[in-house]
Image (cartoon, grey):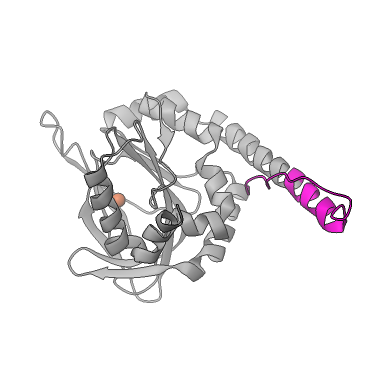
Amino acid sequence: MPPLASSSTLDHASHSVDAIATADSAAISAAVSATGDVLLAKQLDEFDNVGLANAFVEQGKFVHVPHFLPESLTQALIDGMQAARVDMNRNYLPGHKKGGSVSRHTIDTLAPAIATLYRSPTLIAWLEKMAGEKLMPSPETDPHAYALYFYTEPGDHIGWHYDTSYYKGRRYTVLLGVLDRSSAKLEYKLHTRDAARAPVDGSIGLNPGALVFFDGDQLSHRITPLGVGEERVSLTFEYVTDPTMGAWQRFISNMKDAVAYFGFRQVFSLRRKK
Ligand SMILES: [Fe+2]
């Protein structure tokens, strides 16, 4: 679902095969994008959405839907992941994280279909139903708004953490399975920040097309280490209830993303252009 090509003024000299091809490609892109949204809406209509929303609340703002995306959209994510992985940045932070990441800035260039899904009105409306509040995409300067996580070498993992919000509002995380030929699991602890509830442990695989949705500040979670010869890729979408962020919080957030995820080039190169 790539974004629409921008319109341009055509003079007689450029009114050529190229121009016609551009117009056709814009029309095709729009059709593919609309089709993706319709397919997603049809899939979501078949779920017990009231039951899922109740589960989300009962589990302390966490829900797992094993077969969330229609097959064609899952395939679009896989294609996008394969296109974007050439720009993967690997990190090793002893005791916390080892693996590869691709930021939204690279996704915008190499896998725009993923960016289109991130902004899908159907997807956002469904997430809002779960969260019970209005959600907004993260600002364009946030390299983590949508990102791919690659676990491709033995021992790749991320330790226990929360997806802390540096925004003035809440930060919600979507994880979508893209590829999973691994024994690695998403492990989580529910209710760790609710003194009235006993913690509940969980462990799940994230098959291609599966979704996990949670409030980043409420769910303690980790990905267990990858085994030899295994591979796992997931996609994260970040939505917020208030997209404003203080200058100090933005600095801390960018440094974390540069050091632990995307590297300084991916995090700061777009900002330098502005
Ligand atoms: Fe996380």
Q: Is residue 10 magenta?
A: yes
Q: Is residue 107 left or right of residue 98?
A: right
When the figure is inspected, residue 113 is found, relative to residue 242, above or below; the finding is: below
The mark total stands at: 0
Q: Nearer the viewer, residue 54 or 128?
A: 128
Q: Residue at x 31, y 69 (%)?
A: 91
Q: Residue at x 60, y 53 (%)?
A: 76
Residue 13 picture location, percent across and down: 87, 55
Q: Nearer the viewer, residue 184 or 41?
A: 41
When the figure is inspected, residue 271 is found, relative to residue 87, above or below; the finding is: above
Q: Is residue 163 visible?
A: no
Q: Nearer the viewer, residue 188 or 151?
A: 151
Residue 267 picture location, percent across and down: 37, 58
Q: Residue at x 38, y 27 (%)?
A: 53
Q: Is residue 115 magenta?
A: no
Residue 116 picture location, percent across and down: 57, 44
Image quadrant of residue 98?
bottom left
When the figure is inspected, residue 186 is found, relative to residue 154, above or below; the finding is: above
Image quadrant of residue 205?
bottom left
**Magenta stretch?**
1-27
Q: Is residue 231 left or right of residue 26?
A: left
Q: Is residue 108 visible?
A: yes
Q: Residue at x 25, y 32 (%)?
A: 60
Residue 229 picture location, percent across and down: 40, 76
Q: Is residue 201 left or right of residue 198?
A: right
